[in-house]
Amino acid sequence: MRRDIFTPDHEAFRESVRDFIGNEVVPHYADWEKAGRLPREIFGKLGSLGVLGMAIPEEYGGAGLSDYRYNVVLQEEAARALVTLGTVRTQLDVILPYFLAYATEEQRGRWLPGMAAGKLLTAIAMTEPGTGSDLAGIRTTAVRDGDAYVLNGAKTFITGGLLADLVIGVARTSSDPGDRRAGLTLLVVEDGMAGFTRGRVLDKIGIKAQDTVELAFDDVRVPVANRLGEEGEAFKYLGHNLPQERMTVAVGSVAQAGAAIATTVDYVKQRKAFGTPVATFQNTKFELAAMAAEVEAAQAMLDRAVLELVDGRLSGADAAKVKLFCTETQGRVVDRCLQLFGGYGYMAEFPIARLYTDARVARIYAGTSEVMKVIIAKSLGL
């Protein structure tokens, strides 16, 4: 089905990204998976290409194009090449919006040029042991002491935390028994601050080229000048960006489900069983036909939501519907594709195995499928 959400500028961007991924990512991707992260230099190259600064204003070294469709193109091209771009997606889709929306002019001048150039890498530290999706339960504290906050606490499952130069930490600066959501503040912790340490690099079953770590803050003095936005308003800020964060997961899910179908079609045409190509069996045809229809439906839903997001109209409930449908579709499709590979689908050397393990977290992070259902149910008045 024809897609009409992209302009010629988006397609020109797609060509440059496709070439970059083919030349700079694919040949090295296996090594990056073994290392558990992308090398810093790849961020510099992406910065030089203009990818990291698309949404950053021109005066800070970016292109000034606040158009989420460029982010979509980047994810689609990575999936097409059967790779991921590690923490690039997190930096562009999840973290950068906080700097663009809430940084002061002084902070913008201090941080945005480095982010656009790929010299400053970022992470956001929300999740804590025991909190999960319950951000109102955050226990990390930040106590004001003169011109600084004294930060104490621990975070886990932090994407990109290993190499991050700037970490947006969510901390409790005050408590209100009547409103658990009140009193949270965003503080930017910089690499090298005394008391800021990185713990274990967590061993995940998938997305191996993306580091995920534990972080600890032990009496870290964070200057008040590093606060993003107003004190006590972080819960509102976090909620404001959640639709895009959830859309980002959905975009990856649909693109990777499509990639799974494409690599499976190629495989079944070559693989023989009982002397006959697997592609000739009715079950193979029916399975792939059904999956293609399902992914097409998810793509149509997603494309509509992308345009709603670009126009600033995407509601939290609609973003939850899109994430729920697209990630659950990805899970079903990749599982069925792997089945068509037979025993070879269980072998790590085949891309379908990586697509399978990578897919599982999509139904967990940025809000679990169960949380999405709660949000949708509330929109129905339930």
Image (cartoon, rainbow, N blue to C red):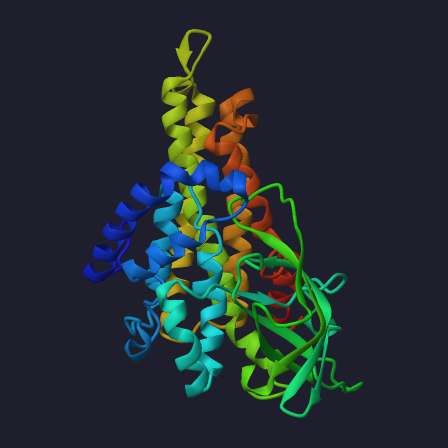
Foreground pick, 236 / 372 = 236
Position in image of residue 105 (x %, y %): 41, 87
Foreground pick, 69 / 1 = 69
Residue extending farthest to the bottom is 146
The quarter in which the C terminus is drawn is bottom right
User: Residue at 52% across / 36% down in the picture?
Assistant: 354
Q: Is residue 30 left or right of residue 5?
A: right
Position in image of residue 291 (x %, y %): 45, 38
Position in image of residue 121 (x %, y %): 47, 63
User: Residue at 53% across / 29% down in the picture?
Assistant: 348
Q: Is residue 360 left or right of residue 111?
A: right
Give the total number of marks visible in the rendering: 0
User: Residue at 75% across / 61% down in the picture?
Assistant: 129
- State which quadrant residue 343 falls in: top right
- Residue 355 vs 103, above or below: the answer is above
Foreground pick, 230 / 236 = 230
Position in image of residue 48 (x %, y %): 29, 60
